[in-house]
Image (cartoon, rainbow, N blue to C red):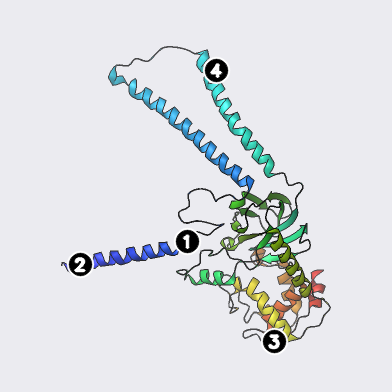
Amino acid sequence: MKSIPRKLASALLLAGAWVGGAAHAVADLPGGPAVNQLNLHPPVTRIAEEQHFLHWMMLIICTVIFVGVFAVMFYAIWKHRKSQGAQAANFHESVTVEVVWTVIPFLIVIGMALPATKVLVAQKDTTNADLTIKTTGYQWKWGYDYLKGEGEGLSFISTLDSSHRAMSNSGNVANAPDNYLLKVDHPLVVPVGKKIRIITTANDVIHAFMVPAFGIKQDAIPGFVRDTWFRAEKVGDYYGQCAELCGKEHAYMPIHVKVLSASDYSQWVQAEQKKAAAKLDDPAKVWALDDLMKRGEKVYAANCAACHQPSGKGAGPIKPLDGSAIVKDADPAKQLQVVLQGAANGAMPAWKQLSDTDLAAVVSYTKNAWSNKTGQLVQPAAVVAQRGK
């Protein structure tokens, strides 16, 4: 019988060691969430600093009022309780009391409203921006278009890193990195100390662009254009997420903003412009199947594998592509329309934002990958023809 407590103690010690090890395995993510975080994110913009001040100022004021009011109330209840022979006073009104409890709350509200209004007005002042970027929410990723300023003309899609998604799907997150589910393939890059105007919209449902360290959160609504701004005062990596419940992949829609020095940002812009020029495809170009397959495999991994799986077998309500009748159909227009327009009431999102060559490549890939092996080749010109329908 003595061995049972010993075994139980050993089990508890092992469990404690495992929990302790798991806790120590997690570290703070600079620019992102921290272990046991109770306060707001450390601010790196003036607006975020003002928000911190407002938060603590109003919390302290409310706490003082709470303690003061309830202290007086409980004192009155205790001091004038019936068991002590207290008698209720008989009076009708007091002008002095009426004035005091009207004027003091009014002054408190004004004292809270003035600094809050100042910050709210500053948050909406998007004029004189050094850089303007349109952020478009998709199910479930972000599109960035540099509209004005250094880097004008750059455009790319930012998607959750495929290795993090695979880790989440497997459920094996014991060795998850500190930036788990926050790493993306193409972060938003901006220069330090410059006013960045963010224009938000959405392609499908309501999303929300939120980066706590910048003190910004702006809804992205289909058919509407909203805007906000920030000026990061420190270089580094900063993280956020879509803050509007936008569907089943909502948790896989992170935001990564990389703030660089002015010189590093200029170098990044030059490098990205060279990449964009190299990727500028002629939609009239005729491709060989092998070349389209190589490109299509990369497009599929970045955009399609999360739902349809790398094996093409699908999962749950997600239909498989391996052996799919519409994929193997001799008429590629049917699959192209699904890819361009979406399907199943938005469960399958539209992919119009991808280039004609990328769409031709991914469709050609699915028609020839796994067991499909149709030998069919879809050229970019076919995508161009289907976009107008």
Mark 3 vs mark 4: which is more N-terminal? 4
Question: Element at badge 2?
Answer: helix
- The three-letter amino acid code for the residue at tag 4 is Val
Q: Position of residue 367 (x, y in %)?
A: 69, 82
Q: Tell me the crowding category of disc 2: few under 14, some 14 to 19, or many 20 or more residues within 10 angstroms, Cα based.
A: few
- The three-letter amino acid code for the residue at tag 3 is Thr
- The three-letter amino acid code for the residue at tag 1 is Ala
- The alpha-carbon separation of the residues under discs 3 and 1 comes to 49 Å
Instruction: Tell me if I can see residue 107 in this picture.
Output: yes
Mark 4 vs mark 1: which is more N-terminal? 1
Q: Which dot marks residue 4? A: 2
- The alpha-carbon separation of the residues under discs 2 and 1 comes to 37 Å
Q: Nearer the viewer, mark 3 or mark 4?
A: 4
Q: Tell me the crowding category of disc 3: few under 14, some 14 to 19, or many 20 or more residues within 10 angstroms, Cα based.
A: some
Q: Which dot marks residue 99? A: 4
Q: Which dot marks residue 27? A: 1
- Residue underneath mark 3: 374
At a point 62% along the width and 81% down the height, the residue shown is: 322
At a point 53% along the width and 48% down the height, the residue shown is: 40
